[in-house]
């Protein structure tokens, strides 16, 4: 990718009469390129696809690629899965094509997950797909090539600290003694395998590390340097640990509540409730939800890395394919409002639309269709024109001061997310201070649709704009989680907007805030407990109580204790008001 800058440089060369601007091609850094791609495919594929979420004939709760840990499967028994792994239907071209059809620009696949099994040909460990399976081939060669053929960037996930196959790595506490010194594992497996993935599959965009622990800062620096020595342009993510990443990751499926400027970051997320294939996980997210989440993430400045878990034959679940291709249809028309955009110039608090930007342009993502008219405040730049991105039909508008009113059709033109393009007179939008993306609102509205809906079979209803089916007999239990509240340290009042039939009142709720960190002690929690009151079935706002928020990053978790009535409670949003 190149940026062409038109510099108005007067030509001083002898004989040159033209003053036409000369295009200057400026190469972008790998990090800038990465940030501009915005949308990528994550693939979790490994031996765990064989049991597919069942052990000894019983379904196993939790994410599928963790089955070895959930069931404490001894290493020799887990190794036997390799003899059943024969993905004869794997086709690298089909997978890469799926990514392209979805409108994705990069692909990251598990080269080795926590189970320690290498999905590539490895000299450093025989526990790999070529040596230990009847398949006997290296699928990564084909996939890397198929991605290169389509101009998709390619990268590998590698679990650097957890390796349940190895006594000296982190994670396996059922086969091996607790005491461990990672040095031999680092020398014999981690560094050699990382070198292998960087040597044998062409240029990598990223080595995507995960669950940092056990390794010291020096060991992490050595790991990072080993990547850069082989491929200086290859990025590493923040989950390498000890602040050694080139770009940042949010928690899984977790979108920050506000614009996060100044750094490059990415949200890894699943299409259902697992990363690795589970045959009984049919809890698919809707394309509409995913398109809206993408607009939310990109408007806050991030990238979206969306996961598929192919089965043990090498087939991508048909539902995943359908969902990705539906997203791709939207991207085909609206990709201009996603790729190479920058974050919203507006504060996203208490609005259900989002904005992405390019020089001289704003893209309004109408996640909830407002009907015939839409008005918002804060834009000071002069609007020259307004139109739908799909079809280009112009929109009648009136700009008064910092208020812009648009005349719209009653029905949403797009079933997922209608994008409106504003051509503005300034390169960068001028926005009144209180509406700017970095304004700190005294009252913060946390909508359910922005939250991570953690748990299984937990639903969002667009009609009532609320989350429901709060049950906690699942692992993890169903709860709403909001992340990242910069500068929000201190006490606040918490109100909730929800609906509950009087007959269904009485569920105990819990709300907690804490600062969660990978490599340090968590701070908090501050907690609130109480009982959900009936609202006569209508949406009402009620006070839950007073809570402490932590800085700089805080996680807020809301859940109901599972009982006969909690599943029907509908939660629209929490409202946080700072105690002065
Ligand atoms: O433990 C892993 C999990 O299996 C999965 O790989 C995700 C993807 O981001 N990362 C870890 C948990 O955060």
Image (tube, helix red, strand yellow):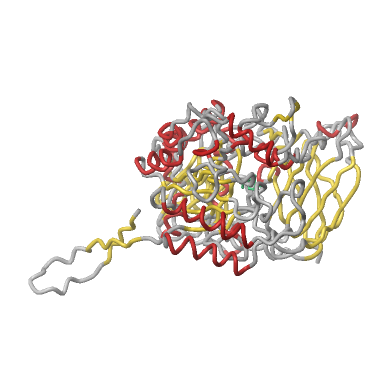
Q: Quadrant location of residue 15?
A: bottom left
Relative vertical location of residue 403 with respect to residue 469 in this rendering, above or below? below
In what quadrant of the picture does the C terminus appear? bottom right
Left or right: where does residue 152 sit relative to residue 371?
Answer: left
Residue 159 appears at what percent x and percent y? 60, 51
Q: Identify which residue is drawn at 42% across, 41% down.
A: 141
Report whether 537 appears left or right of 456.
Answer: right
Q: Is residue 395 visible?
A: no
Is 333 in front, or is 215? 215
| Residue 116 appears in the rendering | yes
In terms of image quadrants, where is residue 97? top left
Between 196 and 239, the one nearer to me in the picture: 196
Q: In this rendered view, identify the residue nearer to me: 563 or 488.
A: 563
Residue 258, image x and y in percent? Answer: 63, 56
Percent x, y of residue 243: 60, 65
Please give left or right for residue 328 compared with residue 493 in the image. Answer: left
- Picture coordinates of residue 294 (x, y %)? 55, 44
- Residue at screen point 50% across, 31% down: 135
């Amino acid at each position: 990718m190149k940026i062409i800058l038109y510099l108005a440089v007067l030509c001083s060369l002898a004989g040159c009469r033209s003053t036409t601007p000369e295009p200057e091609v400026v190469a972008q850094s790998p990090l800038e390129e990465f940030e501009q791609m915005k949308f990528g495919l994550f693939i979790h594929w490994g031996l765990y696809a064989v049991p597919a979420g069942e052990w000894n004939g019983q379904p196993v709760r939790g994410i599928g690629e963790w089955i070895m840990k959930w069931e404490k499967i001894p290493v020799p028994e887990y190794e036997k899965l390799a003899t059943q792994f024969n993905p004869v239907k794997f086709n690298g071209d089909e997978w890469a094509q799926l990514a392209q059809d979805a409108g994705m620009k990069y692909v990251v696949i598990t080269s080795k997950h926590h189970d320690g099994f290498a999905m590539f040909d490895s000299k450093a460990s025989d526990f790999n797909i070529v040596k230990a399976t009847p398949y006997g081939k290296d699928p990564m060669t084909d996939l890397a090539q198929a991605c290169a053929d389509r101009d998709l960037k390619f990268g590998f996930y590698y679990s650097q600290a957890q390796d349940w196959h190895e006594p000296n790595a982190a994670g396996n506490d059922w086969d091996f003694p607790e005491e461990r010194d990672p040095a031999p594992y680092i020398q014999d497996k981690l560094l050699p395998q990382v070198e292998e993935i960087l040597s044998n599959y062409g240029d990598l965009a990223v080595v995507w590390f995960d669950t940092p622990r056990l390794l010291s800062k020096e060991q992490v620096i050595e790991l990072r340097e080993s990547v850069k020595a082989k491929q200086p342009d290859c990025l590493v993510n923040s989950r390498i640990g000890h602040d050694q990443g080139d770009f940042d990751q949010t928690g899984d499926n977790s979108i920050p509540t506000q614009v996060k400027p100044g750094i490059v970051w990415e949200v890894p997320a699943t299409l259902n409730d697992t990363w690795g294939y589970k045959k009984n996980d049919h809890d698919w997210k809707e394309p509409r939800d995913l398109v809206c989440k993408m607009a939310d993430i990109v408007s806050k400045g991030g990238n979206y890395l969306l996961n598929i878990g192919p089965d043990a034959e090498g087939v991508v679940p048909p539902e995943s394919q359908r969902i990705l291709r539906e997203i791709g249809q939207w991207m085909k028309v609206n990709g201009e409002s996603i790729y190479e955009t920058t974050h919203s110039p507006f504060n996203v608090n208490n609005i259900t639309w989002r904005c992405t930007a390019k020089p001289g342009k704003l893209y309004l993502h109408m996640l909830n269709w407002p009907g015939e008219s839409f008005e918002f405040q804060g834009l000071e730049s002069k609007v020259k024109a307004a139109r739908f991105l799909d079809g280009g039909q112009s929109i009648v508008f009136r700009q008064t001061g910092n208020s812009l009113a648009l005349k719209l059709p009653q029905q949403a033109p797009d079933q997922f997310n209608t994008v409106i393009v504003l051509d503005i007179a300034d390169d960068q939008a001028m926005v009144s201070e209180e509406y700017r993306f970095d304004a700190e609102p005294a009252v913060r509205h946390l909508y359910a649709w922005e939250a991570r809906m953690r748990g299984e079979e937990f639903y969002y209803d667009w009609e009532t704009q609320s989350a429901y089916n709060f049950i906690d007999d699942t692992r993890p239990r169903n709860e709403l989680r909001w992340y990242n509240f910069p500068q929000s340290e201190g006490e606040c009042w918490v109100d909730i907007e929800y609906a509950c039939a009087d007959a269904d009142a009485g569920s105990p709720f819990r709300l907690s805030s804490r600062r969660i960190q990978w490599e340090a002690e968590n701070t908090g929690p501050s907690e609130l407990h109480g009982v959900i009151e009936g609202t006569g079935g209508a949406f009402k706002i009620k006070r839950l109580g007073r809570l402490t928020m932590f800085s700089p990053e805080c996680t807020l978790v809301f859940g109901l204790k599972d009982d006969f009535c909690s599943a029907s409670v509908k939660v629209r949003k929490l409202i946080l008001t700072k105690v002065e």
